[in-house]
Image (cartoon, grey):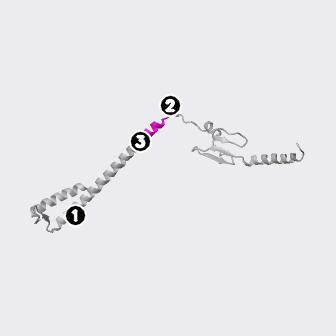
Amino acid sequence: MPVFSLPRFAAALLAAAAMQSAFAQYVWLDENGVRQYSDRPPPASVPEKRILKQPGSPGRPLSEAAEAPAAAPADAAAQPTLADRDADFKKRRKEQVEKERKTAEETRAAEEKKRSCDRAREYLKALDSGERITRTGATGEREFLSDEQRAREVREARDYVDRCR
């Protein structure tokens, strides 16, 4: 090795060692299972098994550090296949569409009932006002309601309005 390259090599080695300490990183999983990165150690509340990497250690894979749920299936056969997941998705989508259709139908029926009740209230108000009410007869001529017809119409309109409540 030539003499002039030895100081350069030593300087590069010293720079690399200094850079290694600059990259001192801690990696751990917090209580929500989210990876946290810091140049400072994790809080004391974090257990040692959830610390994934410390300066001076090679680190551990996530599978070792994460706590596996007790009810997790042990074999791949228990996992749903793509076809099963697709069938479940289609079933949920069909149920959602049916629910939306039913909700829209109920809303439409409620609006129609409200309009009908409003018309009945207006008709009852007109009957109670004492104005003469006319109808178009079978021959196309105007016919006025008699007192008996008016009383019957008032009774029917009140019954209908009472059912609206």
Which image quadrant is residue 42 in? top right
Closest to the observer, 25 or 128: 25
How far across and down, in percent of the image, does residue 153 sit? Answer: 15, 60
* Residue at left offset 50%, top offset 31%: 77
Disc 2 vs disc 3: which is toward the camera? Answer: 3
How far across and down, in percent of the image, does residue 51 sit? Answer: 65, 41
Q: Secondary structure at mark 1?
A: helix
Disc on res. 122: 1
**Separation of residues labelled 2 and 1 (CA atoms):** 68 Å
How far across and down, in percent of the image, does residue 47 sit? Answer: 63, 40
Which image quadrant is residue 34 in? top right
Q: Is residue 152 above or below residue 88?
A: below
Amino acid type at mark 2: Ala
Q: How many marks?
A: 3
Q: Is residue 86 a member of the stretch shown in magenta?
A: yes
* Residue at left offset 26%, top offset 59%: 115
Residue, disc 3: 90
* Dot 2 or dot 1, earlier in sequence: 2
